[in-house]
Image (cartoon, grey):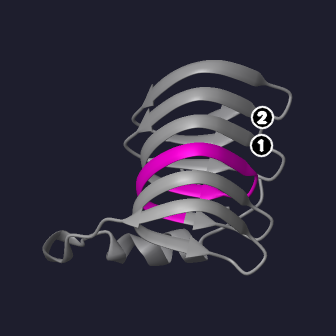
Amino acid sequence: MKKIDNSYSFIDKSTDIDGNFNLSIDLVVKGNIKGKIISSKTVYIYGGGSFTGNLKSESLVVEGTFIGEADCKFIKILNGGVLRGNIKSNILKVESKAIFEGKNQIIRDLKKDKYRKNIKELETEFILM
């Protein structure tokens, strides 16, 4: 996964949460969440972690399981990741052994496509926690 600075929330693998989140920092999910997430940053669902519900964030990176609806500028499903549901994104990247089942609506404003400069960072700076 992407290298994360010191400003993030962490849901450990032994944690199950049902509720709503409104975040201005990255969220790392190794446990299980049901509910709604709104984040101005990136949500990472690690292998073994899961999210079920509605999500709106700057970016979503899935290595675990995501079931629901997502509205993000950038979505990446990593090898082994599963995303089932309907999504809206500017950019969707699906690795070769990832699973995507659902509908994707690409939303792109070419005049304001400033997010392209951040894609290389998300693609190249992954570490294991």
Relative to 17, does residue 30 appear above or below in the rendering? Answer: below
x, y percent for residue 11: 70, 32
Relative to 23, does residue 129 appear above or below in the rendering? Answer: below
Looking at this view, is 27 or 37 the one in front? 37
x, y percent for residue 86: 52, 52
Residue 117 within the segment the image draws in magenta: no
Looking at this view, is 67 or 33 the one in front? 67
**Where is mark 1, residue-wise?**
49
Relative to 36, does residue 115 appear above or below in the rendering? Answer: below
Q: Could you say whether the residue bearing mark 1 is in a helix, strand or loop?
A: loop
Describe residue 51's horizontal placement relative to residue 117 as left or right: right
| Mark before the other along the chain sequence, 2 or 1 | 2
The stretch of residues the image draws in magenta is 60-75
Amino acid identity at mark 1: Gly
Residue 65 within the segment the image draws in magenta: yes
Amino acid identity at mark 2: Gly
Q: Which residue is rendered at x = 79% and y = 25% of the image?
A: 15
For the N terminus, the quadrant is bottom right
Say the numbered circle drawn on residue 31: 2
